[in-house]
Image (spheres, rainbow, N blue to C red):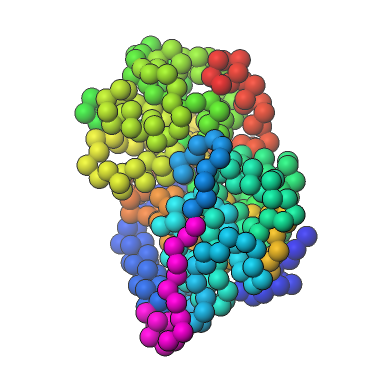
Amino acid sequence: MLKASDVMGCMMGHKVRTNVNAQSSAISALLIALVSISGALTACSPSSTPPSTTSQSASTTASSANGNDASNTSATPNASIASATAAVPNQLTIYTSIDKAALEPLLTSYARQINVPIHIVQDEPMSILARLKAEGANSPADVILTEDAGIFSTAVEEGLLQPFNAEKAVAHVPERYRDPDGNWIALSSYARTAVYDSRVLHSNDISSYADLSKPKWSQKLCLSQGKYIPNQSLVVNLINNLGDKRTQEVMQGWLANLSVPVLLDDSEVLKAIESGKCQIGLVNSNHYGRYLQAHPDTPIKIKWINKGYGGVSTNITGVAIPHAAKHTELALGLIEWLAAKDQQSLYASLSNTFPIDPNAEASVLLKSWGDIEVSPIPVRFYGERQALAVDSMQQAGYY
């Protein structure tokens, strides 16, 4: 097992804190620092080049929605976000499903700090795993940064990851957000919760996942397909809280209440609500945040569901090191740097997720959505019990 000390130095059931001014100031200061670094680098080095845009790979399979201080960097003129496609000596390659806008400010800063280019390959979560399997030992990937603990568990089962010991990172990541065998850690979390058409519904109309199975929601509900991994993770949570039999009854009620056949993914659910095809659906909160930023006048609102019923189901964005990684020292350094409180806060704000560090602040946007009660289930269960969830979904007809 790799130890970070040997290489380069480089929401359980709590209420979201409401110190908006403090959080906003911290995020603003961090962003200003990043901009200042970029300007200083350009001015000081005529040979420096601006970061290139990240490469975008073709999606091949299932659809998806997609501490050190970040300002404490050493200006180095040759580091950038690289755009090469093959494994390159002293280049850190990241396979990710996370939006470029949420990563580029942080990775640009870190690349300059260590004077090593960072190459980003963007793809859907399941496509990243398929790519790693196809590439085998020749894969150039050094880091995987994606969402859903179920994805990471699948990667572990298929032998695609290697354990690591990022000692500094562990201090900022509570146990329920880490793989006990050290194969991955979380960087942020999000909830799978209700979104609704505020033109016809009110927040008080919505209570729990089970409530959406009642006849009052007939012809009003939209759901994405059962093969969509976020739904499988949600079902793991429901089985943990309600038991398998009751969970199957809930899913059967959902299916009876659909206004349209099951949809591909969260994006399609949001579009269906926007167009009036349905009134309510279940999506990842980070996917809603991204939709809201693209459609600021949308009538769709979010509701933290299941308060008083075991808490909302949460999942993670996380990071891991592929088994075939060529630059494990650089990968460990990046993981520890990203997990630090200030980087977590900025990353979470940019990706519409919650930071994992209890001392880091949630973004102003997420705080504006109200208090949240979180299910205490360890997120690793989403992978460990995925097969059980799929079996239950098949029996209910939701797969």
Asked if 42 appears above or below 386 in the picture, the reply is below
Answer with left or right where residue 296 lies relative to residue 249.
left
Name the one closer to the observer, 248 or 103.
Answer: 103
Asked if 349 appears above or below 207 in the picture, the reply is below
Instruction: Tell me if residue 143 can be seen.
Output: yes
Name the one closer to the observer, 87 or 286.
Answer: 87
Question: Is residue 228 inside the magenta stretch?
Answer: no
Q: Image quadrant of residue 33?
A: bottom left
Please name the residue shown 78% across and 60% down the image: 1
Measured as percent of width and height from the top left, residue 251 is found at 51, 18
Question: Is residue 42 inside the magenta stretch?
Answer: yes
Please name the residue shown 45% across and 70% down the image: 51
Instruction: Tell me if residue 338 can be seen.
Output: no
Please name the residue shown 35% across and 33% down the image: 270
Could you tell me how many numbered marks the image carries?
Answer: 0
Measured as percent of width and height from the top left, residue 137 is found at 75, 54
Asked if 93 appears above or below 253 in the picture, the reply is below
What span is in magenta?
39-55
